Amino acid sequence: MRTFVTGASGFLGQRVVVALLERGGRVVCLVRRSANLEPLRRLAEQHTGRLDFVWGTLAQPASYADSLEGCACVYHVAAAMKGGTAVLFQNNVVATSELVKAAGRCGVGRFVLISSLAVYGSQSLPTGGVLDETCTLDPQPHLRDPYTYSKHSQEAAVQTACFDARLPIVVVRPGVIYGPGRDCITSRVGLQIGGLLICMGGRQELPYTHVDNCAEAIALAGLTARIEGEAFNIVDDNPPTARQLLRRYRREVARVRTVRIPHIGIMPLSRMCQWYNAYSRGQLPAVLTPYKSAAMWKVIRYSNAKAKRMLSWQPRINFDQGLEATFSALREQNLAHKISA
Amino acid sequence: MSPDVSSNSTTHVRSSIMTKRELKIALVGCGQIADAHLQEIRKIPDVQLVAVCDRAEPLARQAAGRFGVPDIFTNVNELLQSVHPDVLHITTPPQTHRAVALAAFEAGTHVYSEKPFSLDADEATQILSAAQNARLKVCVGHDQLFDPIWVRCREMFRSGRLGDVVHVESIQGYDLSGPFGQVLAAESDHWVHRLPGGLFQNTISHALYRITDFMLDETPQVMAAWRDVHGAGYPTDLRVMLWGKGVSANLVFSTQARPIQRVARIFGTRQIIEVDMDAQVIRCQPAFTLPGALTKLQVPARQFMEAARNLRRNIWRFARSDIHYFAGMKGIFERFYAAIRDEGEDPISPAEIVRVTAIMDAIFESCRDDTAENHPVVDGTQDNSVLPSPADRSSTQPVGAARDGGRG
């Protein structure tokens, strides 16, 4: 089976390519000229004749459109994560719609969209509630951060474009993807300001998924029969809380200077930030607002039951193994920084 | 993303004599800089944002949603004919400025255009002639001239504290690894690469008008060179030297120097001042007044006192919520809207728009000459610091593709 993967040279994309190759497929990778292709080239040597490259970008449909011919599935892994709202919309919404149209014209059998767990309106869940695929998507995504807003709009745009193109779609909504090569102290734990980490709460479960587990689920989303139109949340089993992760990080990786805001203080602080942003006419950005904070740091639980049931997915790497490998990579990185400094 | 300007529209010229009524503002091109425009327009009283337009509907929709704009369009002619704005802000790629501006003039709408104003001085003249014929106002986004710290610098000059200005050094840093830089690296046919001056044409306006604000020559002598210091496949760094009758200048555009700076040093006959746009401070270097070794105490003591004054001033501004990155933009918008209401002069005169554009043309011409002289084409292998000449600019062939045999 021939599949097409966008973002193939990225942190997640590379693992998705591996997962597909391990299942015997043939993979066409859309890659930028400026990307580091060494890992993919090594894979190409190991899987001779089953890994092809297409040089191009999503912004230039002509660069990849011909390569979609004969592909059974498109895995849209590429995503812009930084920049302003307009840039994120250009890359995540506009460019993705063009990809769907091209895939529809070429008769692709399925479109697997890698979305985000952030698209849910988790702020409406009660404390201790469970977030699963039955929860509604955020009704006011423009009040969230630019990335979440763009992913939310991307889902809507892709649903429409797939309907128009009669292209079956499967949506995968991973939580925060971690693993060797990426830091695991993220905004779900707290906000980095200068050299200081402002820890938000601490009791909240972290909706993390190891990059290899996530890649496995994504591969299955393209290969499993009769799941068209479904969406799957991907988080690993038994996630640590923010406090547990930070404690372990301090013990095994490096000291972190922190200020902790207890759960009870998050909402008053958020309201104050929002008020000051309005009062000062934007002198400081509204990094915290009650709406954003409720979505990010509320103590809720995350279910992966649907993915396990319908995709027959099992997170093979547990948190102990995943964090150990991640911390080890971070220690080496820190050491390398010290040596180079 | 550029708008669709294909269809014609009826001429609808409104009187330029207006009472202080609410101006209807529309914007075309909902890319990154549009956010700054919309944010600052919303702070101005007596104006109303009526519509935004972008060829990509999701971009128009997100901008309208976040800034509370009631109407969205994907065709600028439809916008002009439907909502009849008083002012159209053009934040599309420069290649489209002329067509969009002419469409706006036909609809009787004043135009505020982001920098660079046009592809070259000829095009700038065409746009300004059309505006004059339609009795409409035009302004270009030289907004940092209205930034509070630059206004203070001008006040110091006017008060005579600098003496006569003899030299200006303007430094502009740029981060190629930033979100926009990464897009440029990945997309060899990005509209920036197709500008006659490439990346620099899109970015050096601010650094250049900090110089031309003091150098009033119509056609100063220009020596310039650009280089690709990163192996990016296009010129990334630029050095310019300008000689006017009484004032000389350097312009440094660096993608390597850190921290990234927006700084101008004004060399007067009485003192030298350094205007730091990011830190919002002015550092002064007056003449020494103490003899010999005492100078070594006097200078740091003065610097210490000056730093304390700058800190106090910025704390006071912060307390008054007066530190905003795009403060200059609000200032120039207010003056432009006042000029439309006949309540003040044009913030940037048409002659100034053409003069700055012509100097920019001369800079890129000098760079091309330098490349031809010092990095000629040998055995069919083109130097990687070549950008298209004005004659080639209509070509859709990517700059990178011409160099490396088919990037992207």
Image: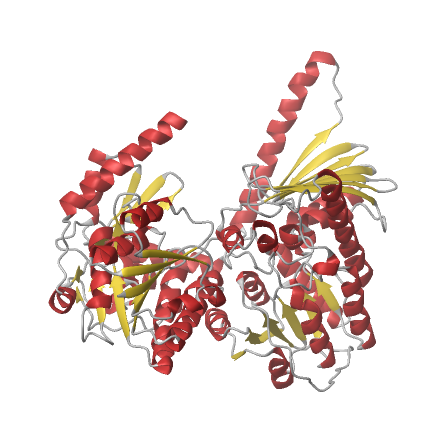
Q: Residue furthest top?
A: B293
Q: Nearer the viewer, residue B349 or A227?
A: A227
> The N terminus of chain B appears in which quarter of the rendering?
bottom right
- Total marks placed: 0
Judge from the rendering whether residue A220 lies leftward or rightward of residue B347; answer left or right.
left
Colour convention: secondary structure
| Residue B24 rendering spot, x and y as whole percentages | 63, 77
| Residue A136 rendering spot, x and y as whole percentages | 25, 73
Look at 59% across and 39% down and name the residue there: B229
The relative height of residue B340 versus residue A327 in the rendered view (above or below) is below
Q: Is residue B397 visible?
A: yes
Look at 36% across and 79% down and name the residue there: A160
The relative height of residue A127 versus residue A185 in the rendered view (above or below) is below
Q: Quadrant of residue B28?
A: bottom right
Q: Is residue A297 visible?
A: no
Q: Nearer the viewer, residue A86 or B382?
A: B382
Judge from the rendering whether residue A7 lies leftward or rightward of residue A297; answer left or right.
right
Q: Nearer the viewer, residue B93 or A278?
A: B93
| Residue A263 rendering spot, x and y as whole percentages | 23, 53
Judge from the rendering whether residue B109 lies leftward or rightward of residue A95; answer left or right.
right
Q: Residue furthest right?
A: B245
Look at 42% across and 54% down and name the residue there: A82
Q: Quadrant of residue A216?
A: bottom left
The relative height of residue B357 versus residue B254 in the rendered view (above or below) is below
| Residue A190 rendering spot, x and y as whole percentages | 30, 49
Q: Quadrant of residue A309?
A: bottom left
